[in-house]
Structure formats: C-alpha cells, structure tokens
Amino acid sequence: MNLFKHTVANRKTKIAVSVVCAVAMMATAFSPKTIIAGAIVRYTTENSIETAIEICDEIWTQESSVVILASNDEEGLSDLLCAAPLAGQENAPILLTPRESLDKRTAKKISELKPETIYLLGDFSETLLKELRNLKTGAALSPLHGEDPWATSRAINEELRDIKGTFVISAASIIDAISISSFAATNRYQILLADENGYVPKNQLTGIVYLVGNEEDVKDIKGAKRLAGQDFYETNKIIVNTLPYRFNSVWIASGESPQLIDLFTVAPAAATRNAAIILINPAEIPADTDNEQGKLTENSLCYVLGGENIISTDAVKHILANVEMQWKPAGTWDELKSAIDAGRNVFLTQNITAENGEELWLKRSVIIDGQNNKLDSRIWITAPNVTFKNLNIELQQPQRNSLLTNNAVVYSESNLRVEGVVTIKGPAEKNFHGLFVENTLTVTEKSLLQVKAGKSGFFEGDGIKAGRLIVEDQALLEGVGGDGDNYSGTGIIADTLILLGEPQVIGIGGLVQLAKDYNKYSDDPYQAMNEKNYPDHVGNGVQCGEFRSDPDCAPTMIARGGSIRNNGFKTDPRATGGCGFVITLTSTPNAQVVGYFAEDASMKTRHNLYYSVPYNVSGYAVYNHSKTSLKLQMILDTSEPAEDRIIGATWKQTFENAPSAPSEDDIDAMEKM
C-alpha cells in the first residue's frame, strides 16, 4: 500500500534516482565512502588519516575499549608490520596521526570511541602524549616501540594471548605483511620478522607455522608451510586461495597504491568478517580470475580502497565477472531445503509450507526469488548475505521448538537485501517480531518491503528491527507493530536509519487492547499498577538511534505511535500513547523529512514516568533526543500547538508539496495488511 501515491508523483525530483548519485551528494555523512552498486563499496579519500577514520566507522559505530595509534609517515609502515594480531585480539581500530602533534580528526574520533587503553606504535612526541591526556577519556597510554622493526615486533607480540599460529615474514616485505594481516588478526596468529639472514628463533614459534615469501628472505623451517609466488601479487593470490577465509566480503586494493599505510588500517575491519585482502595490479588485470574470485558469490560485498585512478570500477567488475550462481527451482519443502543447503539460488514455482513445523535455516549466501509465491515458515539466517526477491512470507502454522533464541518470523544474524516486492507477516495469536536483522537490512531502489508483526508480548512484537537500515531511492518500507494486551510493538526500529534519495517510510505502532474492565480502577490507578493491570509499553511509529538523510532531498514518512483502548485511568502518566518519530542519539545536520507524524491522538498525557530512558518516552509526534536539528515539513492531525507535540527538534511547518494526512481507514487497512 502506498499512501503517498497521489502526492509524491507531483513533487519535483531533486536528485537523480541513481543510488550512486544519491550517496555521492551526501557530503557531510558519506563523502569518502561511495556505494557503487549493491556489491561494491569504494573508499576514495586521498588522505590516510581520513581513510583510517572512515574504515573505523564501518565497524566501530559506537565505542571501542582499545584503540591502536600509529604514525602516518613512512616509519609508521614498519611499526605496523606486526600490529594486526593485536588489533584482532582487542577488537580495536587502527588510527593514524603525525608524530609531533595529534591530528584533530583523529582526536575527535578517539573521544567518540572512549577507549580504556591506547596502544602507541611509534616514537611519539611529548606534545602528542600531552594532547592525548587532555582528551580526558581516562585511557591508559601503552607505548609499543623499539629501536628497530624487530624490537617493535617483540613488544607487540608480548601483548598477545592464546596464540594459535605463526606467520614468519621478512621485515622488508611490507606487501606480504598486508596480505596475511586480516587472517592473522581473525585467527590469533602472531607475526614474526625473520632477521637479516632469514632466520627466527625456534623457541618463538607457536602453533601452525607459515613462511611468507621466498627462501632467500625467510629460511625453511621443518614442518612449516611456505606461501610464496614469483612476486607479491602471486604471493597474495596463494595466500587468499590457501587460507580459509569467509568470502561474504573482501577488501580489494592495489599493491601500487601511493598510500600503502591505508592497507594496514583495513586489517582490523576485514578481520571482523574473516575477509581476505585481495591485491590487484590495475594495469595488468590477471587473465585467470578463478580461485579467490570463484569463491565469491553474487552477494559478496567488495570494499575497494582507492579512487578510480587507483582501481577502476571496470577492474573490480572484471574480478566479479566470473561469479555465477546456479539457480534451482523449488516446488516442495524438500526441494527448497536441498537447494538452500547446497548454496544454490532458488526460485519458487508454487506456494510452499514447511513440513512438521520446521524452519528454514540459511547457512550460505543465497538469493530466494519467490516469484510472488508464498512461503509459510520461519527463516533463520546465519549466512553473511541473503537476498529476498518477490517473496511473500506468512507464518500461519504452529512451530515446533525452534533453534532460534529470537522470536521473529525472519531472523538474520548478518545482512539481508530486499528486491522487488517482499511481504512478511507474523501469526495473529503468537508473540513474534516480523523481521529482525542484526547487521544491515537494505531495501533496494524501487523495491517494496511490508512487514506486520505477530501478537505483541514483552520484548517481542516489533515490525522491523535492524542494526543498520538502508532504504534506497524510490523504495517503500512499511512496518507495523503487533497488538497486545499490555504491550504493543513499534513499527520500525533501527540503530541507524539511512534514507538515500527520496524513499518512503511508513511505521505504525501497535494497539494495546487492555483485556480487563479498567473502570473499576478509575479512582485508584495505582491499584491497577500493583495488580499489573496497566500497559507495560506502547509502541512508537519509527524509532532510531542515528538518522541519516540527504538534506537536499525530501524522503517522505508516515510515523504514528500506538494507542491504548479500554483504559479507565487515562490521566495516569504510565498510560501514554506511543510517539510518532523518535531519534535518540544523532542525525545528519538538517536532515529533511516530509510527512505525517502523530502521537496517539486519544492520549493527552505527555511524559511516561514509568520508563525513564529517552527511547521509551511516549506521547510526542516527534521526539528528537539528538543534538542535531531536523527540517520537518509536517501535516498536523490536531489543532493542538505544534510546540506541545514536538520536542527537541528544529522544524518548519509547511503544507507546500507535503503529502496529505492518511485517513483512519487507510491506517486501519495498513494495520490489517
């Protein structure tokens, strides 16, 4: 259902519909990182300090207890040769700064991360150390530096715990160190530097031992396996094809890059997904793109380090050119399971119902094209990347005891993409979230995703929950929270909500239908509280921690908080209706939204004293807890002063080019989808 279909078509389009253009224009939020296509993300900054911060932001979106700080000069390369295992062990980003003074951008990022420990790789000045202390993060400063690369290596390795294996490299082999860095970080391998004659003390070797490079640089060790090619590109290829990486994502870089230090800052981010770092020579793309390229899938996410002048998009597409996934038809439950277990993309030839209340477990990255057929099953996704296309998921049958710990119709531990028209609906009489995605949920350009939760219970019954929710240009997203007796779900919840271009978002909070006669409590609402006969929670329409949109575009939104019926003590502050649109942390400065925002119109109480944390404050059309302002072009549904209905938001009220408020019939129809 598209409630804006009669009005949005008349609005002037302010940017091209291409996602590339939409993202490229978001200068304040996205400029160094550009999404080229669904499978390619490019980092284009020419400044190593900024690149390190952007890569840090890819993984460490909030705080990190440990930060590793290195210098951005040539000497910093040797300091970083063996740093990746420490970064992996501590789950820490690597940031860069000049030695003499702390870069202001890096200082700001350290303050945001609030580390408890900062490892210093390099001989930094007293001025810089003083500037670090003045950040007042309370972080302990731990220098790890020696007179030469071997001494620095020993200092780093002394910090490692539970070492599982060893890489031996030459101190002169910077590229080889980059090639093995992410695997070492993920799998607790130390990196040892062979001396000038190619030897290392045997008493320093631990676990499985790999020798990286030729015998002239690293001498043979009994029982060790050598990873070496004719040059560092071939060595990289051997490493990528030999070690057990997960190919749900890869990082692609050039060994000719003028900013080699950037490749070291990639390692901690790549390590979080056990991703390989693939080095290519842009001038000589190898003719045989098998092996590591053959391990990629259509859903693999490729991070590209460098602009078009370093690695062209054509070069990246050449790597992906041989990626082919076989498609299998499925008309029965067994056929569907068999195709999924084999890692094949699958299309449904008819409606399919799970047998014996089973759930569909997606362990490998696949595409499920429903061809508008219906699938009656819960879905559990542990694969890195899955795509739903033209699929209707409607859970009707009782489920057996599930392997899932999270009660959701569709639950993904990683990433999910939506293409075409996808609907997800929970059972009316059971407590279920509709869709729960721990990492990134992407609704692609011109696609439609509709989700209706099942019955709402405590901590369950939200329409859509996601870590990062990306809604691309001209897409339509609808989330409806579940109804319940004492608790109703929120329509859409995301840690980060990103609107690219001009999509449309609709979030409706669920209805609390109090099951008992509350009139007897009207004179004594606290008796109702003592007997647990009051609403525990009323869902919001749309709720996010961080909100991002292009200030030059106008995405549209309907956000209405849930309501309460059969309530005999409306004046009690614990019985407020849900908010329309809630932002709890931050937003793009002057992010613009055109739409209809409404708290439950029947609830006049503003503050919810029962819940003291900001994201549970109820009863406002817009609750902006962030310190950044919003441009809100609003339709107000009552004559009540806007100042009483909006808190914390800089806004402007205008009826020009704004959509008409949906009717109650429209919203009722949506809730019954």
Image (cartoon, rainbow, N blue to C red):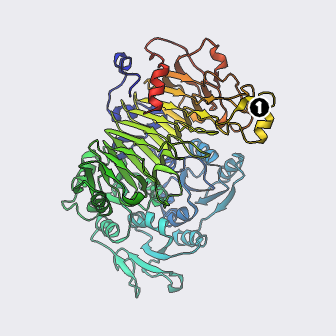
Q: Residues within 10 Å of mark 1 (few under 14, many from 20)?
A: some
Residue at the (76%, 36%) spot, across then down: 528
Q: Position of residue 429 (x, y in %)?
A: 52, 44
Is residue 179 visible from the viewing direction of this image? yes
Residue at the (55%, 33%) spot, across then down: 509
Residue at the (70%, 36%) spot, across then down: 534
- Image vertical order of residue 6 relative to residue 440, above or below: above
Q: What amino acid does circle 1 point to?
A: Tyr
Q: Which residue is mark 1?
A: 521
Given residues 609 and 172, the one toward you in this image is 609
**Is the N terminus in the top left, top right, bottom left or bottom right quadrant?**
top left
- Image vertical order of residue 94 relative to residue 659, above or below: below
Q: Position of residue 494 (x, y in %)?
A: 52, 40
Given residues 562 and 22, the one toward you in this image is 562
Given residues 212 and 207, the one toward you in this image is 207
Q: Position of residue 30 (x, y in %)?
A: 45, 37
- Image vertical order of residue 424 relative to residue 116, above or below: above
Given residues 459 and 556, the one toward you in this image is 459
Q: Horizontal placement of 419 versus 454: left or right?
A: left
